[in-house]
Image: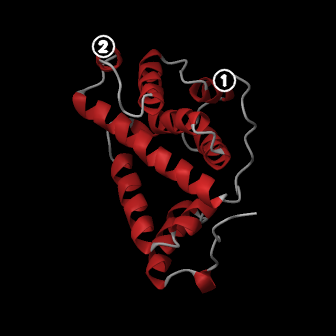
Amino acid sequence: MTRIITPTADNTPAASLPLLDAVNKQLGVIPNLMKVVGNSPAALEGYLSLSGALGKGTLGAKTGERIALAVAELNACNYCLSAHSYLAANLAKLDAAEIEANRRGTSDDAKAAAAVRFATQVVKARGHVVDADVAAVKAAGFSQGEIIEIVVHVALNTLTNYVNEVAQTEIDFPVAAALSH
């Protein structure tokens, strides 16, 4: 049972409707997360703006999904684990082994592994990473701008993890099984 309703078109705030319509045109569906966030037009606009801006960043969709998977696993967000497992496989074209590696905080790709490890350190340390964490991601070839993008990906995914956990959003993707650590 959800704590915060997933509104239908009839009870969605009017200011959220055009934003949700744009999501529907882009994805062909409106995920429950977007509907729940749409309870607040300001929150929905902020989420979509930040997500859209990061989509234009230099990290790319694959690394963005890798980070999303690692963050969702650390934050134990079943909705986001399910959504990003689906998106990683179907949009970013990551294979099952890579998705599992990402959820465990690494990658089969050396450079991507550095980004995912750094993202997990940001989550675990709540931003209070040590110099060695920053040095490691720089040594892997990430620019200062890309390091900031990694941090913002962590923040955006933490935001959606928290919204889904607070709301207990109904999962509308194939459910991803929790990993045993």
The residue beneath circle 2 is 139
The residue beneath circle 1 is 97
Q: At label 1, which amino acid type do we have?
A: Ala
Marks 1/2: CA–CA distance: 25 Å
Q: Earlier in the sequence, mark 1 or mark 2?
A: 1
Question: Where does the image place residue 18, in percent across and percent down from the top left?
Answer: 45, 77
The answer to whether any part of residue 31 appears in the image is: no
Q: Residue at x 55, y 56 (%)?
A: 163
Q: Report the residue that reaches farthest toward the left.
A: 144
Relative placement, left or right, of 78 versus 153 is right
Q: Residues within 10 Å of mark 2 (few under 14, many from 20)?
A: few
Q: At label 2, which amino acid type do we have?
A: Ala
Question: Where does the image place residue 89, in percent across and percent down from the top left?
Answer: 63, 38
Relative placement, left or right, of 121 versus 146 is right
Most foreground residue, 110 or 73: 73
Residue 17 drawn above or below residue 51: below
In the structure shown, which secondary structural element does the residue marked by tag 1 occupy?
A: helix
In the structure shown, which secondary structural element does the residue marked by tag 2 occupy?
A: helix
Whether tag 1 and tag 2 are in contact, CB under 8 A, the answer is no
Relative placement, left or right, of 169 versus 69 is right
How is the protein colored in the picture? secondary structure
Screen quadrant of the N terminus? bottom right
Q: Residue at x 45, y 66 (%)?
A: 44
The quarter of the picture where residue 141 lies is: top left
